[in-house]
Image (tube, grey):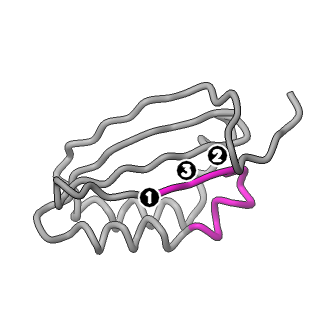
Amino acid sequence: MYGYLSTMRTRPGRRDEMVALLLAGLGEVGPAGCQQYVVGVSDSDPDLIWVSETWSSKQHHDASLQLPAVRAAIQAAMPLLTGELTGQELDVLGGLGLRSTPA
């Protein structure tokens, strides 16, 4: 499985709007191979969002970025963000709540 852990910083006061946008498209990514998608916020930083994703494969993740709803969400998100983004790709070895997939 493929994982991606990221942070993004929103413009002041835009965090809740960005969180709503991130959560709105969940129905699209599940059928595209998303195993887990979690959005969290920082108690100590009001403009920071964390996103943790697990996918059946990197190919599933990459293909999801071409879905019309995902592309529209990315476009809508751009004005809400400062451009301060981090990302880390992971090889997911297992965990609670993940569906196992054949190798």
Q: Which mark is residue 28?
A: none
Q: Are marks 2 and 3 in contact (CB under 8 Å)?
A: yes
Q: Which residues are magenta?
A: 26-38
- Residue that carries the numbered disc 3 in the rendered image: 65
Residue 13 x/y as whole percent: 14, 71
Viewer-nearest residue: 33 or 15: 15
Quarter placement of the N terminus: top right
What residue occupies the far left of the structure in this picture? 12
- Residue that carries the numbered disc 1 in the rendered image: 39
- SS for dot 2: helix
Instruction: Check disc 2 and give the amino acid type.
Output: Ala
Magenta residue check for 91: no
Residue 101 drawn above or below residue 70: above
- Residue that carries the numbered disc 2 in the rendered image: 63
Instruction: Check disc 1 and give the amino acid type.
Output: Val
At a point 29% along the width and 74% down the height, the residue shown is: 17
Q: Quadrant of residue 16?
A: bottom left
- Which mark's residue is nearer the viewer, 2 or 1? 1
Viewer-nearest residue: 1 or 66: 1
Residue 27 drawn above or below residue 64: below
Question: Could you give the CA–CA distance between mark 2 and mark 1, rounded to whole angstroms?
Answer: 20 Å
Q: Is residue 73 left or right of residue 1?
A: left
Viewer-nearest residue: 68 or 61: 61
Q: Residues within 10 Å of mark 2 (few under 14, many from 20)?
A: few
